[in-house]
Image (tube, coloured by chain):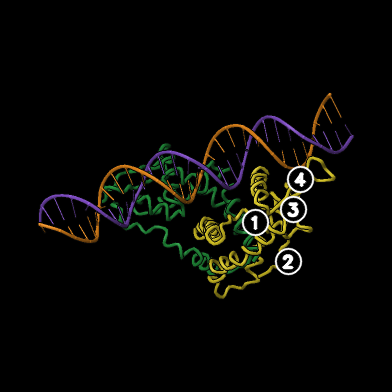
Chain colours: A yellow, B green, C orange, D purple
Amino acid sequence: MRAIARLMLVLPRMLDADLVHDQRMPMSEYATLRTLSEAPGRIMRMSELATACFMSLSGMTRLAAKLESVGYLARLPCESDGRGFNAVLTDAGLARLQEAWPSHLASVRRRIFDHLGDVDLPQFAAVLTAMTAPVGPACDSAGCDA
Amino acid sequence: MRAIARLMLVLPRMLDADLVHDQRMPMSEYATLRTLSEAPGRIMRMSELATACFMSLSGMTRLAAKLESVGYLARLPCESDGRGFNAVLTDAGLARLQEAWPSHLASVRRRIFDHLGDVDLPQFAAVLTAMTAPVGPACDSAGCDA
DNA sequence: AGCATTTTTGCTTCGTCAAGCAAATACCTG
DNA sequence: CAGGTATTTGCTTGACGAAGCAAAAATGCT
């Protein structure tokens, strides 16, 4: 019980810190790029993107502005709805993500998998998926890349 | 793998949001009060406290100042080292923690344990503890004059 | 027009880094 | 050993970025 509380406090920060340290990229950016990269056409509405990344709309507006300013992402007015904007992952953004993910993967492996010992992995994965499920199926958990 | 990334992204925010919503208390405050409450004499050096809560020293300085201003905590000059300060949990602080923890417990139960199913709990706990272990023991209060 | 929806902006809070102050400790030098 | 200087350590402060909420702006729908 206490271990859980502690885990939730510490682990995300460690993973974030690893990413910042190794790649100069905060977790929120990584999540945004990854989420976009998995979207069909690498395109998503701002509001979808925000929800998928568990950020507020305003937070995503600012993050997208930042990512746009360095060319990782473009915001195009939505053709079918003049109010909307589509965020598109650029080639540069995809390249950046591909540059960053091995580092993140290594971090996750080191911080988590190396400690799993003889845990039943499929069962563990099922539990994790179940835990995040109530929030909504923002991303399909089939086809994990590791 | 993706489930883990997602879990780390989502769960802490949910737990924090629950606590803020139910108790008007951010996770960082809760962690601080809880950590202090577990220390012998409810006293800890600022730097220890910061490390245990996985915050920067400056972050803890500000948080402690805030908690001090509402009477949950006091900072006393350390007798054995003129540079140091000891953070002490006051009775009011302890009361506040005791007021908040059932709510947090319920939140953790609802968000996590309810999804654990038939997982081997002791093993699960051991894994979690192992994962956070590299950060160091939470309350190694050597050096404060409690 | 009137109301709903999508995104942005204003303001606040939280937390980090860089810099700084003060106490403690280490290292000379006689 | 006394006395002085340099370095390190513990904490605080200043300046800033990140992200949230509430309200505004822009657009669509009826």
Distance between mark 1 and mark 4 Cα atoms: 19 Å
Q: Which label's residue is closer to the chain start, 2 or 4?
A: 4
Quadrant of the image for the C terminus of chain A?
A: bottom right
Residue identified by numbered label 1: A31
Would residue A4 be visible to someone looking at this image?
no
Same chain for the residues under marks 2 and 3 in the image: yes
Q: Which mark is residue A142?
A: 2
Residue identified by numbered label 3: A88
Residue identified by numbered label 4: A85
**Disc 1 versus disc 4: nearer the observer:** 4
Is the residue D24 above or below the residue B144 in the image? above
Q: Which amino acid is tagged 2?
A: Ala
Callout 3 crowding tier (Cα within 10 Å): few <14, some 14–19, many ≥20: many
Front in this rendered view, residue B24 or B60: B60
Q: Chain of mark 2?
A: A
Distance between mark 2 and mark 4 Cα atoms: 28 Å
What SS does tag 4 mark?
A: strand
What SS does tag 2 mark?
A: loop
- Residue B122 image position (x, y, % from top left): 52, 68
Q: Chain of mark 4?
A: A
Q: Is residue A82 left or right of residue D22?
A: right
Q: Are marks 1 and 4 in contact (CB under 8 Å)?
A: no
Distance between mark 1 and mark 3 Cα atoms: 14 Å
Which residue, as the protein is rendered here, is positioned at the far bottom? A118
Is the residue C16 above or below the residue A106 in the image? above
Q: Residue at x 54, y 50 (%)?
A: B104
Same chain for the residues under marks 1 and 4 in the image: yes
Front in this rendered view, residue A37 or A6: A37
Q: Which label's residue is closer to the chain start, 1 or 3?
A: 1
Q: Chain of mark 1?
A: A
Q: Which label's residue is closer to the chain start, 2 or 3?
A: 3
